Structures are given as C-alpha cells and as structure tokens.
Image: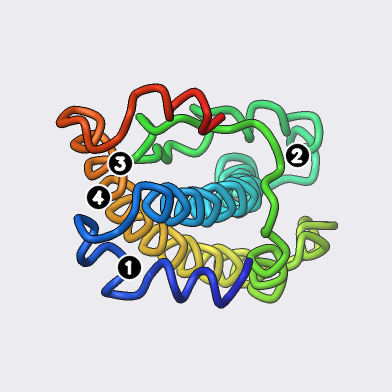
Amino acid sequence: MSQERLKRVLADDFVDGLDTLSTDEIRARRADAQAEEEAVSYVRRLLQGRLDILRAELIRRTDDGSPEAADLLVRLSSVLSDGAAGHRDQLGARATRLRVPEGIDGYTERLDAVLDASALEELEGRTVETLQAFIDRLTDHEHELSEIRQQLFVRIDALRSELAARYKDGRAAIGDLLAER
C-alpha cells in the first residue's frame, strides 16, 4: 500500500470541487481510489480465508472435540467456499477482480502483523482461547479494512458520477472512453 496515496485518497477534500478539475485529473483520482480499493479487497479476502480456517477449527472442536474429527486440510475446500463461514460481503455486488493487485505489500504486512499465516499451522495444538483470540484480532482488522473500503467506494462513486455527468452533458467526449483503456 502506498501510505501517501491512501492518505491522499481518504483525505476529506479528495472529491471536493470536482467540477473545477480536468477530466484527466478526475480519471487519475478514480484510478488511485480504485487501486487502493482493489488492494484492500484482496487482502480482506486473504484475511477472511484465515478467519474461515480458524472458525472451522472451533466448530470441529465443538461438534466433535476428538482428534479423530475430519482433518481440516481435507475439508479446506468447503471451509473456503462461500457457504462455509456464513459471512457475506455486504458490498458483494461490486465486481471482483481475480488478480493480485499492485500495492498490497503494506496491507499484507499489516495483516501478517495482526496474524501471520504461520499461526494457522498445527491448530490442534492451540487452545480454544488462543483460537478465539486469533479470531478476535482478525475480526477487528477486518472491520478496519471494511471501513477503509467503504470510504474508498464513496470517493469512487463520486468520481464516477462526475465523469458520467460530463459524458452526458458533453464536457467530456464519449470517444475518450476508448482512449482510457
């Protein structure tokens, strides 16, 4: 993550006075906001995978409690599927990109500081209290990322609305859309 870019995009004045900015500047701001949202969304999905694994282990212990319960790795595909965690992305109507975005290093470093993926190794040796503490830490971090993501969507929507208004009233040429790609 580019801390400077994120601070700039989340600044209160990032979408102020859009009508005074050039179309190119609005597009550049939209691209920056979209890049940050893409990075946040990607790392949030990584975080949710970690949460799903931890929650599945707690459920396994609650349902069975015995070491003979189905191995978590065997059940991993169902754990990571949409229905496993019961958690739904409220902003799920947004397009999901299936690539690793640029600029995620800062976000993944922060996620690893909250709970490194290596903490998921040998879950059977961890106490229920430790697992719950891991879940709590990840949940708190997910809330932080969700708040950032929502703030980014507000900015992206404002920038898109301004661009759409310009195309509609002729201040920007529709042909510019092709040049944008």
Neighbours of disc 4 within 10 Å: few (<14), some (14-19), many (20+):
some
The quadrant holding residue 171 is top left
What distance separates the C-alpha of mark 2 from that of mark 3? 43 Å
Earlier-in-chain disc, 1 versus 3: 1
SS label for mark 3: helix
Q: Which mark is residue 72?
A: 2
Q: Mark 3 is on which residue type?
A: Arg
Nearest the viewer among 86 and 131 is: 86
Left/right placement of residue 62 relative to residue 144 reads right
Residue 95, given in percent of the width and then of the height, sits at 45, 30
Nearer to us: label 1 or label 2:
1
What distance separates the C-alpha of mark 1 from that of mark 3? 13 Å
Earlier-in-chain disc, 4 versus 1: 1
Earlier-in-chain disc, 1 versus 2: 1
Neighbours of disc 1 within 10 Å: few (<14), some (14-19), many (20+):
some
Nearest the viewer among 140 and 102 is: 102
Residue 142, given in percent of the width and then of the height, sits at 48, 61
